[in-house]
Amino acid sequence: MSQSELHLVSEALARVIVTSIQNACGDSIKEDVRRQRLVTQNSVPTRIWDLLNTALYENAPLYNCTAETTKRGPWQMLLIFDPHSGLLFNIMRETRFKELCRCAPSKRKYHYLPCLTSALNQDLIAGEKQVQMEQVGEVDLDFDIVHKIVTSMLHDLRLSEDVVRHHALVLFMPPGLRCSLCGV
């Protein structure tokens, strides 16, 4: 992803994404556990996603962005579209991204990430410290299946493919609260 495209993302929007991640992994989850008086905390990693997605969903309109949930398999995820930059964002744990990079692709089931990058970032060349989707393993994608998956996800946001310029993946690592933008 070019640096000029990243500069189109407002600093305020970038800050709200980072703050939402930090709060969900820190204060928000601690407060939720305390408020609910949970005896066990078996679902904390999943609960963090609920808190994070809710914060982003509530804050996105303040920055003239669209945020909607979409479903891939049993998992509900949040996509954020910034009309100013034309970027479609989603958030992923860095450990999950590394796992996708290690695992061999399944011909039976396509992961949404290679589909989004194949459809929306085909014209990009990975910059320094960025990962190309080929490194994740799925390079032989069926265009019809990719189109169907991406169209379905964009439909949930009430968007068409022609308004989205590129996809941007925000990676984070909860323990250190490291956050980075990856234009895969």
Image: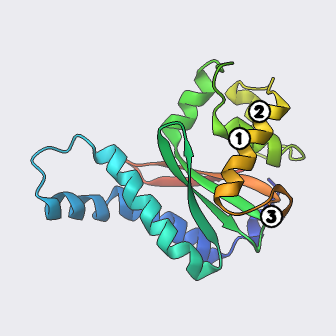
| Helix, strand or loop under label 1 | helix
- Front residue of 117/78: it is 78
* Contact (Cβ within 8 Å) of mark 2 with mark 1: yes
Instruction: Provide residue 90's location: percent of width, then percent of height.
Output: 60, 53
In what quadrant of the picture does the C terminus appear? top right
Q: Which residue has dot 1 on it? A: 149
Which mark's residue is nearer the viewer, 1 or 3? 1
**In this orientation, which residue lies closer to the viewer: 158 or 133?**
158
Front residue (pair 10, 157): 157
Q: Which label is found at residue 145? A: 2
The answer to whether 41 is drawn above or below residue 67 in the figure is above
Above or below residue 178? Residue 119 is: above
Colour scheme employed for the rendering of this structure: rainbow
Q: For the point 65% across and 39% down, which residue is it?
A: 112
Q: Residue at x 39, y 56 (%)?
A: 50
Question: How many residues crowd around disc 1 within 10 Å: few (fewer than 14), some, or many (20 or more)?
Answer: some
Q: Type of residue at label 3?
A: Glu
Residue 32: image tag: none
- Badge 2 amino acid: Ile
Q: Horizontal and vertical percent for residue 28?
A: 30, 64
Distance from disc 1 to disc 3, alpha carbons, whole Å, reads: 25 Å
The CA distance from mark 2 to mark 1 is 6 Å
Residue with the mark numbered 3 = 5
Q: Residues within 10 Å of mark 3 (few under 14, many from 20)?
A: few
Up-down relation of residue 153 to residue 146 (above or below): below
Please tell me which of labels 1 and 3 falls first in the chain: 3
Give how far across and how far down residue 175 sits, in percent: 37, 47
